């Protein structure tokens, strides 16, 4: 499975009145894309030091000598990488960086080998070295974008880095007329934008890939996710229905179809799809933590009562409702629409701003039971997520936007 956020379980997708933080609304990491394997032309820095390690430090294990077999080390590194011999690729890439320390391609090759060996911190440094030498180096931009979008656990900072690298690379690929790189970079950009909740940008990038490669299944998946996040539900339903026979994506397709049918009030049919998703991928789609409607209302009321006095004062006269899932009119109240996966919502102007005369109540907060249940793994996590979601919405009540809340750990 692709290491992304990912569009929603365990990701605290607390949304605001004007914007949302969106990940995979299916509650799991999306399927691993073709882009998960870095380009053969991607890697980093010099050979391992020969110094004796200090007492208590990790023992130094030197790389084997590069067996280039008459080729130059850089060419040998590419050859070994293509054959899946990553340790040999790393040895030759390391020798190439020693011989050519100012060659960004050598560092990029090293980054690729390190990524394939799950040595991500070293890979990040290798790509940083390559891009310090040449900020427009396509292979390094693609490798770095994939590292942050796919291989490393999702976070806003990593997803933002991935999008920056991918978008920069796409500009350079356009200049060079490199179609293959345009496809790969646009695909990684679509992944990163979906993870960031920028579904409109993700849709544009996914459709660009499909205009160049109509059979690209990864782009079709990112497009389906973006359509769902943009509340274009009929199109999303058609897109996910087309993936039911795709073994790699069937679990995610069933999960999203369940979410779409749930929105239509077809709960029995939705549960069939949820059950199928759990059967196909129990790790990605565990059974949701279930809390009765009454118990959920009590948990929300308890969370309100546990707020600090100043927050309870600000919430005076502001109803806090326990609801099942977001209503269409709430999701479509702004542009772009809010994600259907939001855990909570603040409606109305912040404190200090005037209310519209035709709005009653002027301000309100909603927390969504079904979305919250899918976002956690245990009952304790559910109660904690209710608390965090409530704090997020109180932040909006006080005038903070999503970026300010994310900076305070309330994303």
Image: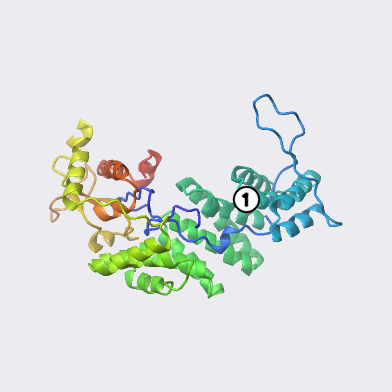
Q: Residue at x 74, y 42 (%)?
A: 46
Please give left or right for residue 44 compared with residue 273 in the image: right
The count of marks equals 1
**In the depicted structure, whether residue 328 falls above or below residue 121:** below
- Residue at coordinates 80% horizontally, 49% vertically from top-left? 66
Work out whether 255 lies above or below 313.
below
Q: Which residue is mark 1?
A: 115
Q: Nearer the viewer, residue 15 or 171?
A: 15
For the C terminus, the quadrant is top left
Q: Position of residue 80 (x, y in %)?
A: 74, 57
Which residue is situated farthest in the top direction here? 55
Q: Position of residue 228 (x, y in %)?
A: 36, 65
Mark 1, Cα crowd under 10 Å, few <14 / some 14-19 / many 20+, is many
Q: Quadrant of residue 242?
A: bottom left
Residue 164: % across, % down: 54, 53
Q: Is residue 86 visible?
A: yes
């Amino acid at each position: 499975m692709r290491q992304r956020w990912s569009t929603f379980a365990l990701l605290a997708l607390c949304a605001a009145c004007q914007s949302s933080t969106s990940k995979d609304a299916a509650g799991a990491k999306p399927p691993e894309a073709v882009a998960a394997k870095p380009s053969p032309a991607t890697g980093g820095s010099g050979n391992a030091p020969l110094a004796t390690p200090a007492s208590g430090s990790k023992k130094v294990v030197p790389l084997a000598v590069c067996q280039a077999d008459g080729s130059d080390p850089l060419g040998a590194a590419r050859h070994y990488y293509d054959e899946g011999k990553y340790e040999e690729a790393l040895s030759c890439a390391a020798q190439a960086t020693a011989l050519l320390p100012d060659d960004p391609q050598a560092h990029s090759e090293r980054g690729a080998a390190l990524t394939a060996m799950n040595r991500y911190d070293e890979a990040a440094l290798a790509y940083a070295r390559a891009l310090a030498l040449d900020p427009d180096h396509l292979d390094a931009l693609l490798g770095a974008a994939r590292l942050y979008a796919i291989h490393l656990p999702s976070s806003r900072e990593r997803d933002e880095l991935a999008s920056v690298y991918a978008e920069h690379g796409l500009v350079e690929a356009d200049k060079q007329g490199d179609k293959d790189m345009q496809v790969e970079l646009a695909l990684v950009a679509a992944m990163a934008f979906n993870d960031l909740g920028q579904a409109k940008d993700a849709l544009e990038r996914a459709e660009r890939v499909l205009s160049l490669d109509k059979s690209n299944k990864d782009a079709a998946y990112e497009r389906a996710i973006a359509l769902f996040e943009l509340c274009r539900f009929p199109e999303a339903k058609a897109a996910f229905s087309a993936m039911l026979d795709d073994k790699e994506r069937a679990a995610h397709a069933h999960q999203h179809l369940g979410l779409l049918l749930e929105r239509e009030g077809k709960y029995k049919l939705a549960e069939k799809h949820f059950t199928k998703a759990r059967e196909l991928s129990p790790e990605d789609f565990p059974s949701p933590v279930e809390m009765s409607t009454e118990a959920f209302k009590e948990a929300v009321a308890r969370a309100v009562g546990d707020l600090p006095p100043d927050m309870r004062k600000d919430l005076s006269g502001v109803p806090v409702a326990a609801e099942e899932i977001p209503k269409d009119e709430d999701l479509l109240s702004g542009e772009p629409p809010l994600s259907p996966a939001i855990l909570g919502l603040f409606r109305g102007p912040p404190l200090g701003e005037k209310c519209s005369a035709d709005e009653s109540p002027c301000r309100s907060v909603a927390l969504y039971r079904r979305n919250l249940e899918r976002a956690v793994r245990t009952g304790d996590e559910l109660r904690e997520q209710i608390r965090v979601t409530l704090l997020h919405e109180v932040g909006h009540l006080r005038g903070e936007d999503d970026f300010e809340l994310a900076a305070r750990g309330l994303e």
